[in-house]
Image (spheres, rainbow, N blue to C red):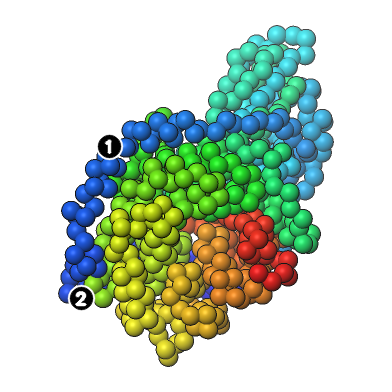
């Protein structure tokens, strides 16, 4: 077990480096045979895409305006702390920290507080919002400012462990620890920043020794664009399914702000990969089509001058794109538009965004060689999963084919197949390349070209792309699962696609089992929202050099609600599809 934990930490260390430098660990730098791309070999060049490019450049400002028009209203409710808690080391508890009752909230309210006194509030569930503090006096003037050190935490580890000793690879300013000074007592004070948390540690860092102060009110006004009263009715097939669904819905709720945020604590921005899974879950739960529409338009309005949809975008202080170019995210933009059209019936938006969808094929095929095989050209971040040792070649091959087929389906729905008439031939060539170059008959599955690496995600994406027939799909997935040396996924994002591939291959029992063991495993460990990363063998694993930087309410983890509720899957129900 120690060796497994060590391997996980090394994997995440490598993944951190990849993410920080935005480089790919795709196909280990193979040189494309013969040079050029598959588009060039089919006579499709810049001139072919010029009309799309011109339309995109002329539309970006309008897309920004449409993004603003679709901004959803935030909904609020007032939540008060439920109890006082303390944390203690516990070997069986998640990350080694058990939560124990430490008194009633009323015991710490409306009584004098002294310097150095501290306590931890438990709000009973993960919430996103702004804290309000009511300070009171006790009949005499408070002759010095009140200084409170407040620390907000999604998980006990964030308060029980020393953040100052941590050395995260991301900025320490993501830690939710603040010191506030209040000059007036009595007063009601609303903190200016939004926080994502369940627990709050309150420590009196400074106060008068004469005129005494206390806390008369502590409450949070939550923020979300999800309307919990409108959530679709659903009858869970079991108590465990109900708990998984509730956790997924709460995760989605707290990430639904004025865009789909990846994490309300960190990174608090829109990411294309997260968007697709959030949208799929939203269609089965809150059905807030406006936030999907806005998110699509935010990405469209902030696309690069070249017409590339960047992988992330910021809302504030103004709309702007992030710096990340993730190949497998770009590949699914058209799929996200298609699924939005299918769920909402909003053909006007799909037609408006069609030039952008068509343009993305130019970018995703830049790494595909004339023989139909993806080979990393070093110009993209190939993500797939936060798993450092993963050779991403087979997975990227599948993700690109998947995206092309969804683009073709969107074109067919809109009557625009002539715009992307090269897709059927290119897809056929890529499927042939996958079978000839990446299929390893000796192993009974797909393997990367250079190092013959077998990964769960390589099989998953090629199955989702429809490359192997039904029998071969089941064979390659089972082979990878039975291979102890195969590289396994470590994020809920990647696990979503692996579970989806199991269902697509007709392996319903295996899909249900994975959903139960992975997402149900988080619920068993006390999760009230699903986490950014979960490695069952190492609860402190994370891609940022410390688990204290992990997001414990993360958008790409909300998709179990989609599997549980969607009529195609009916996960954990035992029903046949």
**Which residue lies at the image location 59% right of the left edge and 48% below the top edge?**
282
Decide which of 201, 231 is in the foreground and name it: 231
Toward which corner of the image does residue 515 lie, by quadrant? bottom right
Is 146 positioned to the left or the right of 349 in the image?
Answer: right
Residue 477 is situated, as x and y percent measured from the top left of the image, at 53, 78
Residue 56 is situated, as x and y percent measured from the top left of the image, at 29, 42
Q: Is residue 490 above or below residue 178?
A: below
Decide which of tag 2 and tag 1 comes sooner along the chain.
2
Residue designated by label 2: 33
Decide which of 136, 530 is in the foreground and name it: 530
- Residue 55 seen in the figure: yes
Residue 397 is situated, as x and y percent measured from the top left of the image, at 37, 69
Mark 1 is surrounded, within 10 Å at the Cα level, by few (under 14), some (14 to 19) or many (20 or more) other residues, namely few
* Image quarter hosting the N terminus: bottom right
Mark 2 is surrounded, within 10 Å at the Cα level, by few (under 14), some (14 to 19) or many (20 or more) other residues, namely few
Q: Nearer the viewer, mark 2 or mark 1?
A: 1
**Which residue lies at the image location 58% right of the left edge and 21% below the top edge?**
181
Residue 95 is situated, as x and y percent measured from the top left of the image, at 63, 57
Q: In the structure shown, which secondary structural element does the residue marked by tag 2 occupy? A: loop
**Which residue lies at the image location 63% right of the left edge and 31% below the top edge?**
75
- Residue 483 seen in the figure: no
Q: Determine which of the numbered discs, if any, sits on residue 58 in the image.
A: 1
User: What whole-number distance in Å separates the C-alpha atoms at marks 2 and 1?
Assistant: 38 Å
Toward which corner of the image does residue 4 lie, by quadrant? bottom right
Q: In the structure shown, which secondary structural element does the residue marked by tag 1 occupy? A: helix
């Amino acid at each position: 077990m120690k060796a497994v934990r060590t391997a996980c930490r090394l994997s995440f260390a490598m993944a951190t480096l990849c993410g920080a430098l935005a480089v790919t660990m795709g196909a280990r730098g193979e040189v494309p045979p013969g040079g050029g791309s598959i588009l060039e070999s089919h006579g499709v060049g810049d001139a072919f895409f010029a009309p799309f490019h011109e339309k995109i450049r002329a539309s970006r400002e309008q897309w920004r305006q449409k993004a603003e028009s679709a901004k959803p209203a935030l909904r609020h409710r007032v939540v008060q702390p439920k109890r006082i808690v303390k944390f203690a080391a516990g070997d069986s508890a998640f990350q080694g920290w058990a939560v124990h009752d430490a008194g009633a909230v009323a015991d710490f309210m409306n009584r004098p507080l002294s310097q150095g006194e501290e306590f931890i509030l438990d709000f009973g569930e993960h919430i996103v919002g702004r804290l309000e503090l009511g300070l009171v006096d006790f009949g005499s003037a408070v002759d010095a400012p009140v200084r409170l050190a407040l620390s907000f935490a999604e998980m006990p580890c964030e308060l029980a462990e020393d953040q100052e000793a941590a050395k995260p690879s991301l900025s320490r300013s993501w830690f939710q620890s603040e010191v506030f000074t209040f000059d007036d007592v009595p007063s009601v004070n609303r903190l200016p920043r939004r926080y994502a948390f369940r627990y709050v540690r309150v420590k009196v860092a400074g106060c008068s020794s004469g005129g005494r102060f206390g806390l008369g009110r502590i409450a949070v006004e939550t923020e979300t664009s999800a309307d919990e009263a409108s959530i679709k009715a659903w009858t869970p097939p079991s108590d465990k399914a109900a708990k998984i669904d509730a956790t997924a819905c709460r995760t989605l709720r707290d990430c639904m702000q004025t865009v789909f945020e990846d994490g309300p604590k960190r990174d608090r921005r829109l990411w294309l990969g997260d968007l697709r899974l959030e949208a799929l879950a939203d269609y089965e739960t809150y059905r807030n089509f406006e936030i999907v529409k806005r998110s699509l338009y935010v990405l469209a309005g902030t696309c690069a001058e070249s017409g590339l949809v960047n992988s992330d975008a910021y809302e504030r202080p103004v709309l702007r794109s992030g710096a990340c170019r993730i190949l497998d995210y770009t590949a699914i933009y058209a799929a996200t538009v298609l699924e939005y059209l299918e769920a909402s019936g909003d053909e006007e938006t799909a037609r408006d965004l069609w030039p952008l969808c068509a343009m993305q094929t130019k970018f995703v095929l830049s790494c595909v060689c004339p023989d139909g095989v993806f080979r990393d050209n070093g110009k993209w971040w190939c993500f797939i999963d936060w798993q450092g040792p993963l050779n991403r070649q087979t997975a990227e091959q599948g993700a690109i084919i998947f995206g092309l087929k969804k683009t073709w389906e969107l074109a067919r729905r809109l009557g625009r197949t002539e715009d992307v008439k090269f897709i059927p031939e290119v897809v056929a060539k890529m499927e042939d390349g996958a079978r000839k170059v990446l299929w390893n008959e000796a192993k009974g599955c797909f393997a990367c070209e250079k190092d013959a690496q077998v990964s769960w995600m390589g099989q998953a994406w090629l199955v989702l792309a429809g490359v192997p027939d039904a029998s071969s799909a089941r064979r390659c997935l089972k082979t990878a699962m039975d291979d102890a040396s195969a590289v396994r996924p470590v994020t809920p994002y990647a696990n979503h696609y692996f579970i989806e591939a199991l269902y697509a291959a007709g392996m319903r029992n295996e899909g249900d089992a994975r959903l139960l063991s992975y997402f149900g495993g988080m619920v068993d460990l006390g999760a009230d929202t699903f986490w950014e990363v979960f490695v069952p063998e190492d609860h402190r694993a994370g891609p940022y050099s410390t688990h204290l930087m992990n997001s414990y309410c993360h958008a790409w983890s909300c998709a179990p609600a989609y599997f549980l509720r969607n009529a195609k899957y009916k996960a954990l129900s035992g029903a046949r599809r």
